[in-house]
Amino acid sequence: MDPLTSIGLVLWTLISLGLTLNVLHPLINRDRARPLSLIFGFGLGWLIGELTIQWILLNAGIFLLLLVFADLEVMVFSWMLGIHLLLWILLLVRLWLVLNQVEYLEDQMLNQLGTEYQMTEAEPPPPKKFRQVNWKLLGLPGSVFKHHDLDVEFNREFEAEPGLNLKLDLYRPRTPGTQRPLLIQIHGGGWVIGSRRQGAYLLSRMVSRGWVGCSIGYRFSPEIRMPEHLIDC
């Protein structure tokens, strides 16, 4: 038996513990950490949180592989296995809660909009076959801004408060119109990273249906702290 493998198993258990806790609650203090640390912590939490099942399988595989060559006492092995089982259960419970948000959102839609929204159909309908997909957008994502009925104004400055100028991207139909509904998009990134261009496809599609779209920018942590991000927006 290789003692280094036993040490590796202990370290892997501690790393797994830290990564799982970071998914459940960020371990990095946003008020004190450097930007790179925030991005690194957010990226790991986001990746493991989104790929929960894949992470559990990978984690279990590495654990079992190290266990084969490790030399551990029964008590230590029991603790290691118990910790990993607990971490996997916590991640699965979190995944179950996330998946059940669909029913919660459905109930809220019914309460707020009634049953009529269920009869609304997308126009044009979303593609259901590979040949119906606009693959041009995948290879040339910038082509979304060249639609004949789309007018995009990038980097338009607005005064969020006296002395603070931020930027937004404004999406409008080229054809004149009044009383158009407005969709405001706040890009993702955990208030740490992100870009206003993330909402380009959604906003361009809504503009094609007569809407006006606005993708607004805001300052990131650690420059500011919550709720200043929302105040910027």
Image (cartoon, rainbow, N blue to C red):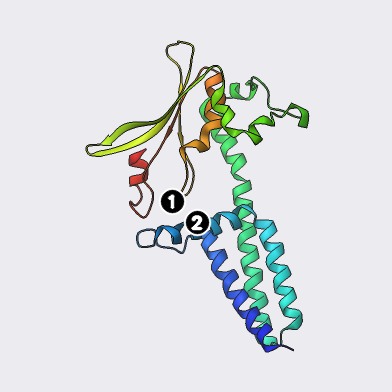
Q: Is residue 109 above or below residue 89?
A: above
Residue plotted at (64% across, 63% down)? 89
The x, y position of residue 130, in whole percent, is 77, 32
**Disc marking residue 7:** none
The x, y position of residue 21, in whole percent, is 53, 65
Q: Secondary structure at mark 1?
A: loop
Pointer 2 with pointer 1, Cβ within 8 A:
yes
Left or right for 26, reference 98: left
The x, y position of residue 45, in whole percent, is 54, 58
For disc 2, the neighbor class at 10 Å (few under 14, some 14 to 19, many from 20) is many
Amino acid tagged 1: Val
Left or right for 148, reference 212: right
Q: Secondary structure at mark 2?
A: helix
The x, y position of residue 133, in whole percent, is 71, 29
Q: CA distance from mark 2 to mark 1?
A: 8 Å
Q: Which residue in the structure is indicated by mark 1?
A: 192
Sequence order check, earlier mark of 2 and 1: 2
**Disc marking residue 42:** 2
Residue plotted at (69% across, 28% down)? 134
Q: Residue furthest left?
A: 162
Q: Is residue 215 above or below residue 21?
A: above
Check the picture and name the quadrant holding the N terminus.
bottom right
Amino acid tagged 2: Phe
For disc 1, the neighbor class at 10 Å (few under 14, some 14 to 19, many from 20) is some
On the image, which quarter does residue 170 sit in?
A: top left
Residue plotted at (74% across, 75% down)? 65
Q: Nearer the viewer, residue 223 or 61?
A: 223
Left or right for 15, reference 169: right
